[in-house]
Image: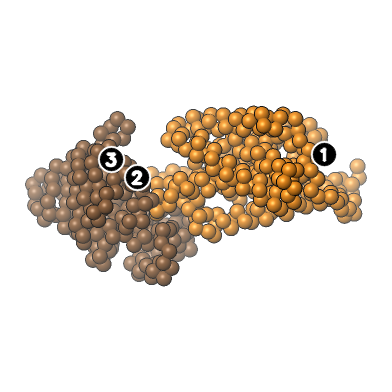
Chain colours: A brown, B orange
Amino acid sequence: MLKVDNINVFYGAIHAIKGISIDVSDGEIVTLIGSNGAGKSTTLRTISGLMKPKTGTIKFEDKDITGVSAHKIVGMGLCQVPEGRHVFSNMTVMENLQLGAYLRKDKAGISQDLEEVFKKFPRLLERKLQVAGTLSGGEQQMLAMGRALMSRPRLLLLDEPSMGLAPLLVKEIFNIIKEINESGTTILLVEQNAKMALDIADKAYVLETGRITLAGTAKELQNSEAVQKAYLGG
Amino acid sequence: MDMGSLLHQFIQQMINGISLGSIYALIALGYTMIYGIIKLINFAHGDIYMVGAYLGFIATTYLGFGFLPAIIFAMLGAGLAGIIIERVAYRPMRNAPRIAILITAIGVSFFLEYTMMLIASPQPRTFPAIFEATVYHLGPLVVNSQQILILVSALVLMVALSYIVNKTKAGMAMRAVSFDADAAQLMGINVDKTISLTFALGSALAAAGGVLVGIYYNSIDPLMGMMPGMKAFIAAVLGGIGIIPGAMAGGLILGVVEALVSGFISSTFRDAASFAILILILLYKPTGLLGKNVREKV
């Protein structure tokens, strides 16, 4: 579904991503783990079109999307929930969700998906008319995810959904990620919380200073000594 | 002066101030919208107002248009000019340091002023009287039809703008881009197009102000945008830059203050009063009257 082939990304003179390749197949949850500054977010931002790779190609459903602008990529069915949520905190929950469906014109489909989102996140329904800036961190994460789902993506990129959340909420969010995946959306998940991420993922990549150092099924990585030492506190 | 005539004078100046203020508000809206979306104080905005006035002049004098077609002509023309200016002068600078784009804006301002001098000569032009200026006497108070025209036009435009910004998809996109351009892109919003639209709307409003002033004062010249441009900037800061209702409120307050100062003190102090307001607001409430102190959440 998604094929990232040997991309190199620069921030000015800084070589942030050094030849990364990632494969995501239809229906999977794939996770990218690694410590702070390893290049996980940059990789996602490059896939979603917010940044452009200097070399290498990115293919989504066999279409070359390298260098295509972010707003067009959304229309192709690939949507990113950015790190730090980035909800429109001056707008209401409802308006945020409507913006998620910005490119869609099928009114019936939109209201159906809105219902789905409210079913997944009942708390958003309660706070429908509340300004998003007044939501708690967990609720904002739910809103950011709900907003992304409103574009009806086939591939959802999640950047650090657990960041800054209480353990109980993290569990809830991860359960919802699994649910979203089970209803047919492929997921590429970036996480610092490697333990949680490996628990729900099918496949995983370990990123260190812009390079992939390990790749395999989530099981394999969970059992790998290096991963246990570096990321699972074992 | 006895109490009665003092009161009449006060109300009379309020009427004058509100009609002047609604012009400031129209121009201030463009400042604030453009600032909101690309964080640029567009110093060429006052000159767009001048271009609008000249377009209105062309429409009425040479094309024989009436008021409504003339103001629409000016708004469309200035809107297009706004789009072109953004495209040619500001877009290439979008990732440059803020000071660079600010200096570019000053350059655009001079470019518009002196190009207009080249085309239309520096001499002031007389704006044709499209309306018989009827003067209405309400007891001791005097209101003329032009003031009513200004007020009604400004009001209609502000209601239309509020509708566009708050109720339409394009308006929602504008708000989203001004709040967080990256997140807006991830919703599928075309940021470049949205910025163009913002320039078009802001410039069209300034042009409407230019035509209304042309009708009111009968005279336009290539440098007419400098002072109102400054005043509108003050109005935008006073209301809270980037906040649309703030620009409307700021414009009206500034107009009323200026009228009161001219009426009760002296019209020579009018401009000084405006700049004093700018200094005071920057000292005591730099976020403006409707601005909130924004704390950055990390």
Residue type beneath disc 3: Pro
Q: Is residue B77 left or right of residue A215?
A: right
| Pointer 2 chain | A
Judging by the rendered image, the residue that carries numbered circle 2 is A50
Secondary element under disc 2, as helix, strand or loop, is loop
Judging by the rendered image, the residue that carries numbered circle 1 is B264
Q: Could you say where residue B298 lies in the image, as x and y percent from the top left?
A: 38, 44
Q: Are marks 3 and 1 on the same chain?
A: no
Q: Could you say where residue A17 lies in the image, as x and y percent from the top left?
A: 24, 39
| Pointer 3 chain | A
Residue at the (69%, 49%) spot, across then down: B71
Secondary element under disc 3, as helix, strand or loop, is loop
Crowd tier of the residue under label 1, counting other residues whose Cα lies within 10 Å: few below 14, some 14–19, many 20 or above? few
| Pointer 1 chain | B
Check residue B42 in the rendering and tell me which mark sits there, or answer none: none
Q: Are marks 2 and 1 on the same chain?
A: no
Q: Could you say where residue A131 lies in the image, as x and y percent from the top left?
A: 47, 57
**Distance from the alpha carbon under mark 2 to that under mark 1:** 57 Å
Q: Are marks 3 and 2 on the same chain?
A: yes
Crowd tier of the residue under label 3, counting other residues whose Cα lies within 10 Å: few below 14, some 14–19, many 20 or above? many
Check residue A53 in the rendering and tell me which mark sits there, or answer none: 3
Residue at the (82%, 39%) spot, across then down: B264
Residue type beneath disc 2: Leu
- Outermost front residue: B63
Crowd tier of the residue under label 2, counting other residues whose Cα lies within 10 Å: few below 14, some 14–19, many 20 or above? some
**Distance from the alpha carbon under mark 3 to that under mark 2:** 10 Å
Q: Could you say where residue B163 lies in the image, as x and y percent from the top left?
A: 58, 58
Question: Nearer the observer, disc 3 or disc 1?
Answer: 3
Q: Nearer the viewer, residue A222 or B20?
A: B20
Question: Nearer the observer, disc 2 or disc 1?
Answer: 2
